[in-house]
Amino acid sequence: MAYSRLRVYYGPRPAERGGAAPQRVTVPLGDVLPILADAQRQERAWVQDFLDDEITISSDLYEVLLAYQHYRRPAG
């Protein structure tokens, strides 16, 4: 009886993508946010690996986040 080994799929290899893997990728927030929110809710360990990574956001989104952070603080 032949046994098959299971392998983890990591997506296409760099050569299959047409070169080296890019260091930066630009994607809409709407594509990333639901995935990150779900991973955070599910307490996925890999989220912790990226907590120190820097991201680039637009200045208007940054201002909205700061305002939201300020106004959501508990009163007291």
Image: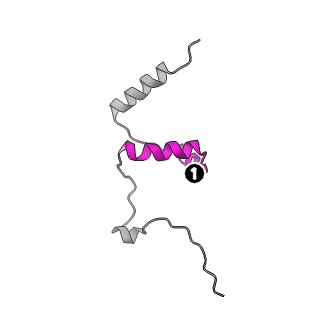
Q: Which residues are magenta?
A: 29-55
Q: Tell me, yes or no, whether the highlighted magenta stretch contains residue 44.
A: yes
Instruction: Identify whether 66 is placed above or below 22.
Output: above
Instruction: Identify whether 3 is placed above or below 72.
Output: below
Task: Examine the image and state in which quarter residue 18 appears.
Answer: bottom left
- Identified by mark 1, the residue type is Trp
The residue located at (34%, 36%) in the rendering is 58
The C terminus - image quarter: top right
Q: Residue furthest top?
A: 76
Instruction: Identify whether 73 is placed above or below 1.
Output: above
The N terminus - image quarter: bottom right
Task: Examine the image and state in which quarter residue 8 appears.
Answer: bottom right
The one nearer the camera, 21 or 16, is 16
The residue located at (38%, 27%) in the rendering is 63
Residue 46: where, in percent of width, then height?
A: 57, 51
29 left or right, relative to 7? left
> Mark 1 = which residue?
46
Residue 13: where, in percent of width, then height?
A: 43, 69
What kind of secondary structure does the magenta stretch mostly adopt?
helix
Residue 23: where, in percent of width, then height?
A: 40, 55
Helix or strand or loop: what does disc 1 sit on?
Answer: helix
The residue located at (39%, 27%) in the rendering is 64
Q: Residue furthest right?
A: 1
The residue located at (38%, 52%) in the rendering is 24
Residue 49: where, in percent of width, then height?
A: 57, 49
Q: Residue furthest front?
A: 1
Q: Tell me, yes or no, whether the highlighted magenta stretch contains residue 39.
A: yes
Badge 1 density bin: few <14, some 14–19, many ≥20, Cα 10 Å: few
